Amino acid sequence: MTRTAVITGGTGGMGRATAKLLGTDHRVVLADLDQQRIDDAIAELTALGVDASGTVCDITDRASVERLLDFAANGEHHVRAVVHTAGVSPQMGKPTFISHINAIGTVNVTQAFLARAAEGDALVNVASVAGHGLPRPLIPFGAFRLAETDPAAFDRVVVRRSRVAGKKLHSGLAYAISKAFVIWYSRQQAAAFGSRGARIVSVSPGSFDTPMGQLEADHGASDLLKVSAIKRFGRPEEIAAVLAFCASDGPGYLTGTDILVDGGTRAGTEFKKAH
């Protein structure tokens, strides 16, 4: 039975870089909304000697996620790792769109994989440094459980909360809330994964030199470099190293936590305030 790793958003900068690392000892299955992007990524990985395939998947549709995992298993393979990089940034849409993809998509991927998880399996959810930066009163923790039971109601709460700021900041605030949810939800699900001998963690990137990261460069991402310890955008390979490690067999005691990979941005922000 071939060990398989599924990477959602697998055609993006983080996803492709992670596939190259996991592909050294896993069969890799990429998921994306665009078949041509999938084909291009598979061609690149195959040329590097990676056993790669892919399929279109809409993470906001639980049935689509189930089909993805069925495709990855293909009756004879074991999906032992999922790296969930799929998501959208503030410049890519309005608050409802952002909330539904980032938060509800994470619920769908998490629950679909949990139902199949076994001893030694791992799920890595990609959050964001933005999920660490909001004042706690702005985060609607009390509504977070609605993401499982009433996704539309959850989205409405996020949209309402995003309106406490000016209109230009609505999508950014919705993004930060959605990523705070990913961090919270990955912790909240740790016991359920542990009962199956599996692990779940979240990883929070800062500003990275990916197409999505560059989309945000002139909308706050570059400003973070002013307070960061490392004065540059991170490279895709640097975040991929963390994602692949978390998904690997090695860190068998790592679960229910978030790993911040932000070049020291949060540290710089906190100590700047302190002084």
Image: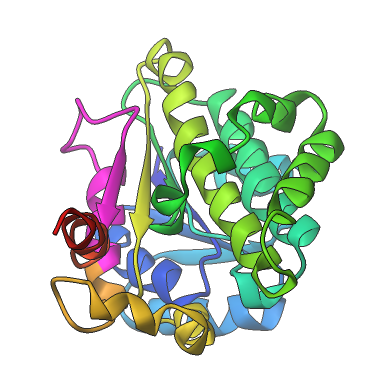
Please report the residue visible at 27 percent of the width from the left and 79 percent of the height from the top.
225
Q: Quick one: which residue is furthest to the top in this view?
A: 195
Q: Quick one: which residue is furthest to the front in this view?
A: 275
Please report the residue visible at 77 percent of the width from the left and 40 percent of the height from the top.
157
Figure check: 17 above or below 146: below
Q: Is residue 259 magenta?
A: yes
How many marks the image carries: the answer is 0
Residue 231 horizontal side relative to residue 152, left or right: left
Please report the residue visible at 25 percent of the width from the left and 61 percent of the height from the top.
269
Instruction: Answer whether residue 209 is visible to the viewer in this image.
Output: no
Which range of residues does the magenta coloring cover?
Answer: 239-261
Please report the residue visible at 22 percent of the width from the left and 84 percent of the height from the top.
232
Nearer the observer, 53 or 31: 31
Image quadrant holding the C terminus, namely: bottom left
- Horizontal and vertical percent position of residue 129: 38, 57
Q: Is residue 249 magenta?
A: yes
- Horizontal and vertical percent position of residue 258: 32, 40
Figure check: 61 above or below 58: above
